[in-house]
């Protein structure tokens, strides 16, 4: 958050066709700089920013200005260990009015909700500092808790990124612990642990210059929390290395301050701020995106771009479609098998919606999985549902047979069907989360009768239904393919 640039709303907004991956804009009062990792407390989600401000949300999609934390300062981070929420933040430094003399302080509370009787901040003390003379800047702290040990990284471009160990029972620095340098040329770091690897993510580039900011997030990994961290090309982070995780996307410029969000069913997303939202006066805003993993490396995923798709099951490869009789396309087999090479050729037109739908029932129609043949009853238009809200970085979607008002819906029996028209009922709204392998999980916003936590699942090669999502199985994973 401290490197100054060298030169000194509808439900969601997506990029135009042919541009970069779509970015969903969160709703509400999303203005924040240097957000902490999004953390749940008492049924709500919180993130805190520089100067003590924060945001709160009921669903991770619509945000409002939240409680003020004490202490002020810059670039806080939050982690829950046991019943305690530890908050780390820095006072001073950053190359601004305080130069590079700074302190990283810790405090804790049992709730982040000011209305809770458990809400009260307790000061722990200073765990790291810089004197303004040595080439280090003790700001931008970030937590990692793994195997009973609590780590904290801090630092900026002014010097190295350092890591120290804290006592998870008290939040204090472990007695005798000395900081270890683990990276250079980055700031606003974060850490993750996965499959025996420690990942150090840091923000590269320039900040605080709105649409001219070049902030972007890079990563290296190590088998030890103390490093050495290297990127995918073997370049050490202590030599300025780092594999790209996310950069500017569409009209959102300068992503920085990574924070991992682990949701149910193995879904992973990450929070950050964009230095400039070009649709919101170039102000710094909160962003949430899917997180993918490719060859052992994290990379920003993407929400579904509105459009028309084949919805394919990862279990069987078959396509979701209406359970109706297939209407044949007129075709003379002799033209394929008996024609001479010199016989003239001409294109066969695609089957039209009118041809395919002539025999469809007027009311509800069940869905099934079958060989994909690029027929209208297998083509689905997916779009954000106007005014329906969303969940953690993505809007609720409608899934409709292309060119019609026929919409996919959940039933009270835990099945899926299509109904003739969109009514806005919650069983007609769908949450689509990208999974870490790049496929998607599809869940109804609600199921009639109150059954919760169900997802679209293939229980056989040709039978879709609603069931509990198993992150270890391909049965609940789907891909969206352009026809």
Image: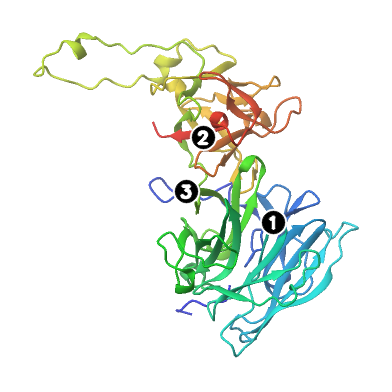
Tag 1 secondary structure: loop
Tell me what residue is drawn at x 66 percent, y 68 percent: 152
Lower position in the chain sequence, tag 1 or tag 3: 1
Q: Which residue in the protein does label 2 denote? A: 382
Give the SS element for disc 3. Answer: strand
In the image, is residue 207 above or below residue 255?
below
Q: Is residue 115 above or below residue 409?
A: below
Color style of the picture: rainbow
Residue 112 visible, this orientation: no
- Nearest to the observer: residue 276 or residue 391: 391
Place residue 113 in its image quadrant. Answer: bottom right
Can you tell which mark lies on residue 147? 1
Could you say where residue 71 lies in the image, as x and y percent from the top left?
Answer: 77, 74
Label 1 or label 2, whichever comes before in sequence order: 1
**How far apart in space, not on screen, are marks 1 and 3 (Cα)?**
25 Å
Residue drawn 62% across the image and 55% down it: 260
Residue 259 in the figure: left or right of residue 326: right
Query: Where is residue 419 shown, x and y percent of the image?
Result: 59, 21
339 relative position to 131: left or right: left
Q: Which mark is residue 209?
A: none
Q: Residue furthest right?
A: 117
How would you rate the neighbour count of disc 1 (Cα within 10 Å): few for under 14, some for 14-19, many for 20 or more? few
């Amino acid at each position: 958050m401290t490197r100054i640039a060298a030169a000194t709303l509808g439900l969601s907004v997506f990029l135009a066709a042919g541009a970069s991956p779509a970015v969903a804009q969160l709703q509400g009062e999303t203005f924040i700089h240097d957000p902490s990792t999004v953390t749940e407390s008492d049924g709500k989600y919180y993130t805190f920013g520089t100067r003590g401000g924060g945001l709160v949300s009921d669903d991770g999609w619509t945000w409002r200005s939240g409680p003020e934390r004490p202490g002020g300062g810059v670039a806080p981070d939050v982690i829950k260990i046991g019943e305690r929420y530890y908050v780390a933040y820095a006072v001073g430094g950053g190359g601004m009015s305080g130069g590079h003399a700074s302190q990283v302080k810790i405090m804790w509370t049992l709730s982040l909700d000011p209305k809770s009787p458990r809400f009260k901040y307790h000061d722990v003390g200073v765990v790291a500092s810089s004197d303004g003379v040595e080439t280090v800047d003790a700001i931008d702290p970030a937590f990692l808790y793994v195997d009973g040990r609590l780590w904290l990284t801090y630092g900026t471009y002014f010097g190295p990124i350092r890591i120290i160990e804290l006592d998870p029972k008290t939040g204090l620095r472990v007695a005798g612990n000395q900081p270890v340098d683990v990276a250079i040329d980055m700031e606003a770091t974060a850490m993750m642990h996965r499959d025996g690897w420690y990942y150090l993510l840091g923000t590269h580039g320039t900040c605080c210059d709105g649409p001219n900011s070049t902030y972007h997030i890079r990563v290296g990994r190590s088998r030890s929390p103390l490093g050495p961290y290297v990127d995918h090309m073997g370049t050490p982070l202590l030599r300025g290395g780092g594999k790209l995780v996310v950069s500017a996307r569409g009209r959102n410029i300068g992503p920085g301050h990574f924070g991992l969000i682990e949701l149910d069913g193995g879904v992973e997303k990450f929070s950050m701020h964009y230095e400039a939202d070009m649709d919101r006066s170039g102000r710094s805003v909160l962003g949430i995106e899917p997180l993918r993993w490719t060859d052992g490396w994290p990379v920003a995923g993407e929400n579904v771009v509105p459009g028309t798709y084949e919805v394919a099951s990862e279990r069987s490869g078959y396509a979701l479609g209406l359970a109706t009789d297939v209407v044949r396309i007129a075709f003379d087999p002799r033209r394929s098998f008996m024609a001479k090479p010199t016989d003239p050729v001409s294109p066969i037109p695609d089957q039209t919606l009118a041809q395919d739908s002539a025999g469809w029932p007027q009311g509800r129609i069940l869905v099934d999985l079958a060989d994909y043949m690029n027929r209208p009853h297998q083509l689905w238009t997916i779009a954000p549902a106007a005014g329906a809200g969303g969940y953690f970085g993505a809007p609720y979607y409608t899934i409709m047979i292309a060119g019609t008002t026929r919409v996919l819906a959940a039933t009270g029996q835990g099945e899926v069907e299509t109904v003739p028209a969109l009514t806005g009922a919650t069983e007609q709204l769908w949450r689509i989360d990208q999974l870490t392998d790049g496929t998607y999980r599809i869940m109804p916003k609600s199921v009639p009768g109150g059954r919760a936590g169900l997802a679209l699942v293939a229980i056989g090669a040709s039978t879709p239904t609603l069931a509990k999502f198993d992150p270890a199985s391909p049965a609940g994973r789907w891909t969206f393919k352009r026809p």
